[in-house]
Amino acid sequence: MGDLMVPFQAGLPIPTYELQSRPRMELTDGWHMMRMNLDSELSLSARTPETIAALEKEGKGAHLADFEDSRWLIAMVPGVSNPAPRVSANGVWYRRRITVPPAWRGKRLLLHCLGANYVADLWVNGRHVGYHEGGFTPFSFDITSFLNEDAPDVIAVRVDNPPWRLPLSDLQQSLLPPGPGDWWNGTGLVRDFFLEAVPAVSVVRADVRAEPLEHGVKLKTAVVLRNAGSATVAGRMELRIFPTRVAEANLTSPSAEAIMMTHQPVEVTEGSGNAEISIAANAVNAWAQTLTTEDLSEWSPAHPNLYVLEVTLRAEDGRVADRLTTQFGVRAFTVDQGKPRLLLNGQPIVLVGLNRIEDDPQLGRTRSYRDALRTLLDLRVAKNMGANFLRLGHGVAHPLTTLLTDRMGLLCWEEIPAAWLSAEAMQLQWERRRLARQTFIEMVYQDFNRPSVGFWGVGHALAPGAVHRDFTRDLADIGRFLDGTRVIGESSVLDEHSPEQTEADVLGYALSPSVGANEGALGDAISVLDRRHRAQPAKPVIVIEFGARAGSDASAWDRQVALAEDVGRILSARPWVAGCAWWTLADCQAPEGVRETGVVSRDRHTTRPVERVLQTQFGAFAARDRDGAAETDQE
C-alpha cells in the first residue's frame, strides 16, 4: 500500500500476536476430539468447492452444527492427539460449542490459532471458513459473518498431520519439514486457540524499525488499520512511546502494556506522532510515521532495554475507538564489513549459547501463554550459564518465547522448518508450493518488533546444488526486503558435501553428534570448517550445533565434557568464529525415543557436568568479545 508492505493471510492483514486489552475468549476446555485416518493427498489439495465437499464427506458430517459428538473424547487445547510414544491415526477432528457474549455485538470476532500441526481446516456452524498449512506459525480468521444471531455456535476443526516415514514419499517431499525430525511429530491444535472481539475499525498491527543515530534514535513506524464497517470513517491516530520496567511480577505477561511506565512518555524531538486518517468502508490502509527522540537506550543481552509503542485510534468526536501496544527495542545487529565478525550496536560480539527445542514431558511440543513459567525456566538455565545466544530449534517459536528473550537479554536465531530438504523438495517449494516463502513471511511478521531476534534462518541441512542457491536466495531476498535489520543465516551439517551458503550473511555449521564419539572425527570436521572459511573469508562462522549424547552412565557424561572442552579450545583459536551453540539445552522426545543431548534432563531435574564446562567456555568467549571491543575503540 503505497510504499508500505502490508502482510495478508486468508484475505486479512496479519494481526499482532501480542495480546491486547480487548475482550477475549480462551477456547481451552470444552472440546470433543476424535482421531481419524485422513486423506493427506486431499489435505494438500487446493480448497476448491469439490475439495471442501470431499473433506466434509470424509468427516462423515463432523463439520455440521448438529453432528452427534457426545461419544468423542474430551480434550484440552492446546494438546496433541498422539502423545509420545503413541503412534495413532494421522489426523483428528475437534468440535466445540461457544456462546458469544451479548456485549460483543457490533464487534468483529477474530479467531486466532497460534499453531496447528499440520494442515487445519475450520468450519463454523457447518460452513467452511478457511484453512492453513504449517505447524509452527499462527493464523487468524474473521468469523463474524458465520455466527448465529441469537443461538450458540459450533466450531469444528479438522487437523491432518501426514506421518513421517522413510524413505520419503512424494507427498512428504512437499511438507515443511518432510521429516523425520529432531522432535516428536505431535498432531493437533498445538498452541493457543482463542476468540478476540475487535471494533469494526481497528488497529491491526504496528511495526517499528528503530535506527540508532549519532545523537538519538529514528523510529520508522508502519501502522495498519482495518475498517470492516459499511461506511467511510475519519478520525485521528496518536502514537506515543513509553519506557518499561520489567520485574518478576510482570516478566511473563504476554502483554506489552503490563511492562510500560505510563506516567512518563518519551519526548519526541521530531515528528508529531499524530495523524488525521480516513479509511473507506471494507478497506485496509497503512500509515507511515517517522519519530526521532534522544531518550532511548540500546538493547543488548547485557542491558535488555525495552520500550512500548502505543497506538490510539480516536473517532471524530475524540472518543477512543481502539488501542494497540507493542514491545520493541533499539539495536543495530550487522556483519562487520571489514572483518569476519558480528557487531551489536557497533561493538563486536561473540555469541555463546544453546539450542532449545519446545518440548517437555508434560506438554510435549504444545505451548501456550499459560505455560510461561516453563519457558522462563529454560531461559534462566541459559542465562545462569552465561549464555547470550539461543537458537530456537528448527521452527518458529511460540510468540511468548521471543517476548521473554527480549526481556531477559538473549539474542536469538529463528528459522523456518525447512529442514532436511532434498533438491527435489526445494525445487518443489521454489517453483510451485511456495510454502517456505509463506512460512518465512509469517515468521518475519510474527516477530518483526522483537529486538532479541537477530537472525532469520532460511533452513537447516539443505541439499547442495543449483536449486539450493535459488531456494535460499529467494528467502534471503524476502528477509532483506521486508525487514533489513537482521542477519540472514543458514545451518548445514559440517561435512564435505554441505552447500556453500552463498546467499547467507554468516556461515552456520552443525557438528554431527558423532564427532564426540568417534576418534579423529572432530579433527576432520574442523579441517572442513577451515576450508569453508577460506572459501568465504569475509563471512563470520557460527558453529550453530555441537554436542554429544549423554546417556545414563558417567562415561557418556564424560564424553559431553571432553567434547565441550575440545570444541571450546579449537574455536577460541579461530577469531573468525563469531559464535557457537550447544545441542541442546534439554533432552527432547524424538521419533525413536528421548535424545539425551541436553545440559539438563528432559524433566529439568538433572543438570549434567557439561553445564559447568560450558559456563567456563562461555566466559572465555565473552573475554574475547571484550578484547574485540577494545580493539575497535583503539582503531
Image (tube, rainbow, N blue to C red):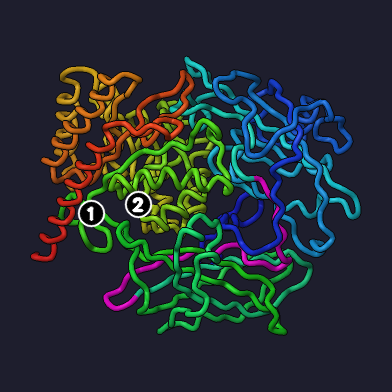
Mark 2 neighbour class, 10 Å CA radius: few under 14, some 14 to 19, many 20 or more: many
Tell me which amino acid carries mark 2.
Leu
- Residue 160 lies left or right of residue 358; in this view the side is right
Residue 356 percent coordinates (x, y)? 40, 39
Q: Residue furthest top?
A: 167
Residue 369 visible, this orientation: yes
Going 12% across and 65% down the picture, which residue do you hit? Answer: 633
- Residue 106 lies left or right of residue 164; in this view the side is right
Residue 421 percent coordinates (x, y)? 42, 29
Quarter in which the C terminus is drawn: bottom left
Mark 1 and mark 2: span between their CA atoms? 11 Å
Q: Which quarter of the picture shows residue 118?
A: top right
Going 82% across and 57% down the picture, which residue do you hit? Answer: 101
Residue at which label 1 appears = 349
Residue at which label 2 appears = 411
Residue 212 percent coordinates (x, y)? 32, 70
Tell me which amino acid carries mark 1.
Ile
Quarter in which the N terminus is drawn: bottom right
Residue 41 percent coordinates (x, y)? 64, 24
- Residue placed most toward the observer, 176 or 306: 306
Magenta region includes residue 201: yes
The stretch of residues the image draws in magenta is 193-216
Going 16% across and 60% down the picture, which residue do you hit? Answer: 629
- Residue placed most toward the observer, 305 or 543: 305
Magenta region includes residue 497: no
| Label 2: element kind | strand
Q: Residue furthest right?
A: 150
Q: Which mark is residue 177?
A: none
Magenta segment main secondary structure: strand
Mark 1 and mark 2 in contact? Answer it, CB < 8 Å.
yes
Q: Residue furthest front?
A: 605
